[in-house]
Image: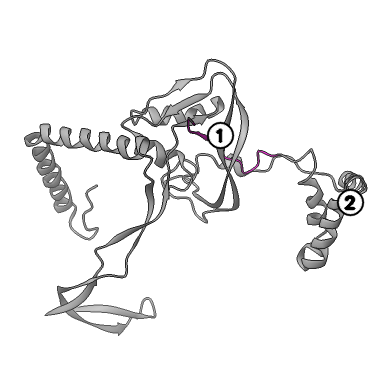
Amino acid sequence: MVETHMIKPYKERVYATKAVLETTFEFIKSNASELVELNQNADKNSVIEFFHKKIFLPVKFSLSEKFDEVLFKGYEYKKELSEISGKEKIVYTNIPKEIKVKFYREVAAVDSIQIPDYYIIPAEWSFLVNRMVFHGIQYFKSDYDTALIVERYRFSNVKYAENSYEGRQRVSFDLEKFEEEVIIPAGSFIVPTNQRTIRIITHLLEPKCEDSFVQWGFMNQIFEQKEYFEEYVMEKIAEEMMNENPELKKEFQKKLAEDESFKNNPYERLNFFYKKSPYWDNNLNLYPVMRYTLKF
């Protein structure tokens, strides 16, 4: 992406962008074979490292504490009270000044993911697969119903961004991974990770990744509760549940004793039983994309 200064004249911005693009295209043309080879080798190495060797793929990074001091050539400035904003503003002078600044060079991985052999996407989420095809990602469909033990994610502490960004409402959350035996219906999309796009597949389908479908708001409907209870109905059901399950009654009484906010919230007291009843939607906050790795 070429970014030119907003205050520069429009003509200069256009020609600056044109110059960058022409230089870039000329470099690509002159080094095409080498660039293609470098990319192909990088893709092969990714498959070797993250699929065959099962090395963890770093997905989040942070600067280390180490830094170098570098000399920054700038200009002296002063601060004056602004009549417009009502606070101090920076006013630069024409006097050159050299300033020592900290330059942090080292980046360390703070979170990583071990990539599975396959991702399984339910047929109703086909629009995700359609977007993945744009990236050259290959997939196939299951021919028949299959029982598998898969890895799944469940979300909690879900928070939507206050404002939309690039036309989408991003979302953040906490994650819990667990194993579950499920029936994979015929027609489900199976995405093998043993392919050159292994990194892209992971960044699109792993919820931890900042560029994943789910963080970009493509799947916000999984966070929406669709069914609720009528209080007069739940009162009767809760009584029956306590009478039939003494341990549940003890758990409820313990929460009343320890959680003052819960104790003073009639709706949450009923919701306690609703979440443990057969009527609760277990798919709420459940990530529909599943992970599967062959076991030998």
How packed mark 2 is, by other alpha carbons closer than 10 Å (few <14, some 14-19, many 20 or more), is few
Which one is nearer the viewer's eye here, 276 or 181? 181
Label drawn at residue 246: 2
Q: Amino acid at mark 1?
A: Val
Q: Is residue 95 visible?
A: no
- Compared to residue 17, the image places residue 81 above or below, namely below
Identify the magenta region: 282-295
Q: In the figure, residue 157 lies in which quadrant?
A: bottom right
Residue sitting at x 33%, y 33%: 197
Q: Position of residue 291 (x, y in %)?
A: 50, 35
Along the line of sight, which residue is nearer the eye, 153 or 146? 146
Q: Is residue 255 left or right of residue 40?
A: right
The residue indicated by pointer 1 is 150
Q: Is residue 255 above or below residue 172?
A: below
**Quarter holding residue 5:** bottom left
Please name the residue shown 38% across and 40% down the image: 54
Residue extending furthest toward the top: 143
Residue at figure coordinates x 56%, y 18% from the top left: 186
Based on the picture, tell me whether residue 292 belongs to the magenta stretch.
yes
Q: Which mark is residue 272?
A: none
Question: Of 71 and 292, which appears nearest the observer?
Answer: 292
